Amino acid sequence: MHFSKTIALIILACLGAGCTTTGQVRQSIGVETVTSDKALAFPPPGGPAIINIVERRRAKDVEQTIALSTSSSVSGQNFLKVQFLGITGSNPGLGSRPFNTISDSAIAREMAAAVPGVRLARSATIVQNNYGPFGYAAGQSRAGDTCLYAWQQVKAGFAPPQEQRNFGTVQVRIRLCDAHATERQLLSTVYGYTIAGHFAGAALNPFGAPRGADAVLGKPGELVYPDAAPYRTAPISIGYQNHPAVTRPAVIRRPAVVQPQPQAAPALPPMIGPRVPLPDGQTDPSQTNGASSIAAPPPANTASNIIVPLPDCNGATGISQGCR
């Protein structure tokens, strides 16, 4: 009984107040996707490409999460997140927002959420880019991908015209994972990114006063070199020598010793005419196809090789045998 009376009272209350249900879904206020030309920060030239930008606005604070191209097996998306934290109080000149420093516990939670499953080691080296010092941690996944998470807070100390604190702050977070890049290559993105946004009020400027030129410029007697390498006077012999002369030991060339070769005896000319056999089985060198080019010495005088001259027929007193 009591339950039915309660339902009846609720129905009567809704009818009296005009309760209606439309069933429409409305977009959340302050969250939208913007184009790349409205980005408040940009990666360096040649760096990761911008995929999309999600912007959130809370009062006068603006936060952009700039999604970057990712080539990695690690879960998550590469991003460049930038937060412009201004003054929301009634008196911006005095600064109603408290100054919040970066804590180690907050950075540890951010890294665990941005790079899950990868153990990142914080670097103890002091590093600084165009906007001041920053911190980073790097590591490798089990698949060999290199990951880096960097954090930076851009905040000036004092504004020279008003001699008061610059209460505007820019918070930057960078998450990068790549299957082919090294830690040094990923770190170049942190050095080369550009903040494109700024605060309208001078008291909120987090970048401080623009840096002036070096005091030595334009002063006589101050040497300004194009690089940091030491410069020394070049030795002069005949003009300037960029490199010292290289002395080499003299090389003495001696003629090669030629060993004398034995000269062969000249070959005898071939005999013309009939070939006459020599006595006692001797052979003529010309009849042996030049087997020996040196003639053999004549044999000793024997009974078989003594030649007796014939008598002269002219003026002989008697007729001898063989003369007619």
Image (cartoon, rainbow, N blue to C red):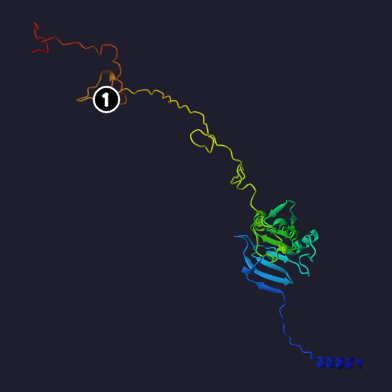
Element class at badge 1: helix
Q: Residue furthest top?
A: 317
Against 116, residue 239 (above or below) is above
At 25% across and 20% down in the image, what residue appears? 278
- Residue corresponding to mark 1: 286
Quadrant of the rendered image containing residue 210: bottom right
Report the side of 272 relative to 182 (left or right). left
Rendered position, 33 above or below 186: below
Q: Quadrant of the C terminus?
A: top left
- What type is the residue that disc 1 sits on? Ser
Numbered-mark total: 1
* Coordinates of residue 163 in the picture (x, y in percent): 75, 58
> How many other residues sit within 10 Å of disc 1, few (<14), some (14-19) or many (≥20)?
some
Percent coordinates x, y for residue 20 in the rendering:
77, 89
Horizontal arrangement in the rendering, residue 162 relative to residue 194 (left or right): right
Among the 4 quarters of the image, the one containing residue 73: bottom right
Q: Please, which residue is most extreme toward the right here?
A: 2
Looking at the image, which is closer to me, 94 or 22?
A: 94
Residue 208's spot in the image, x, y percent?
70, 58
